[in-house]
Amino acid sequence: MENTSAPISLLQIQSVRLKMTDERIFKFFLVVATYSIFIYLNCVMFVAVRSKTAFRETSRYILFAHILFNDILHLVTSMVLYIFNALYLEIIQAFCSLLALISTSTFTNEPLNLAVMSLERYIAVCFPLRHGELSTPERTFLALVVIWVLGTANMLTDILTVVFVEPSFFLHSGLCIREQLMKKSWQRNKEVAFSVLFFTLVAGVLLYTYVSITLEARSVSTDRSSAQKAMRTVLLHAAQLCLSLMTFLYTIFEVLMMSLPLDVFAQLRFVNYMVVLLLPRCLSPLIYGLRDQSFQLVFMYYFTYGTRSVKPAKPSSVGAM
């Protein structure tokens, strides 16, 4: 096995078994409750956005529905992985690899989805006459296929590497730790390269679309109200990208804390998990979805189990979202 010392140290620190105290039980239920609440909210939003024909046939709502579905998968798999590791439950590595594939792919999918959503707003403002032709449901679903191909590429490479290097690994049982799939030193460099490439690409798309929409908003012939809404949407996508980027800090902070005493490390690791890893991912789709007035009405109808009336949703091509 061709591993560097850093992954081995990280594996060792992640495998430390702590006693199940009252404090750890409280933290465990706090994390699971947080996951459960936001999984439920995302599910309600997903049902709401899929409930109206107008939403299902509009590109930006199709993309929003996908980001909700993607985040539901991510939160569910992340919660399952947390439960397994918090309770030190050993599972067969083939199943662990599947969970890691879903969790890693859905994490990568979100910023790519944000880039496509920004491009859709760019087309709506800068090419309004061609928006209906370019932003069709068929083209949107094709973009989603591309997102999943790119999103799974990194993790699939690691799994295929293990298949060729150590195929018997998938038959073993143990704790489900992502770094166990790092059998070659180049894999870690490859993972960093993928992350930098994707997030640089997304940041470039967001910057380009924002600047283009800003310039178009200054044009006399442009609907400035719609352009300003699109500008705010792209800025919101940038904020969501920053929330996604925070997840990369989790491992960095964990490595920096490894030299601390074990009891201090355990406390700071929990704070790191909640503040840097969990909450940003949970809040991103909720903040984005509830700012759209047409969607708010439908969401509140389903969130209150139909006790509140809802007006017919008529999303425009360059609405607030």
Image: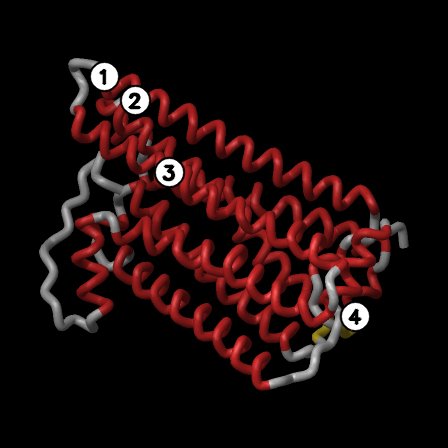
Residue at image position (72%, 73%) is 92
Measuring from the top left, give residue 245's x and y in whole percent. 53, 44
Task: Find disc 4 in the rendering and name its residue.
Answer: 171
The reply to whether discs 1 and 4 touch (Cβ–Cβ < 8 Å) is: no
> Which corner quadrant of the image does residue 8 belong to?
bottom right
Of 260 and 7, nearer the camera is: 260
Task: Find disc 3 in the rendering and name its residue.
Answer: 117
Amino acid at pointer 2: Thr
Task: Find disc 2 in the rendering and name its residue.
Answer: 214
Q: How many marks?
A: 4
Earlier-in-chain disc, 2 versus 3: 3
Residue 279, above or below 236: below
The reply to whether discs 1 and 2 touch (Cβ–Cβ < 8 Å) is: yes
Residue 307, above or below 282: below
Quarter in which the C terminus is drawn:
top left
Earlier-in-chain disc, 1 versus 3: 3
Q: Please state which of the two labelled residues, at mark 1 or mark 4, is closer to the viewer.
A: 1
Amino acid at pointer 1: Arg
Which numbered tag is attached to residue 218?
1
Residue at image position (72%, 40%) is 190
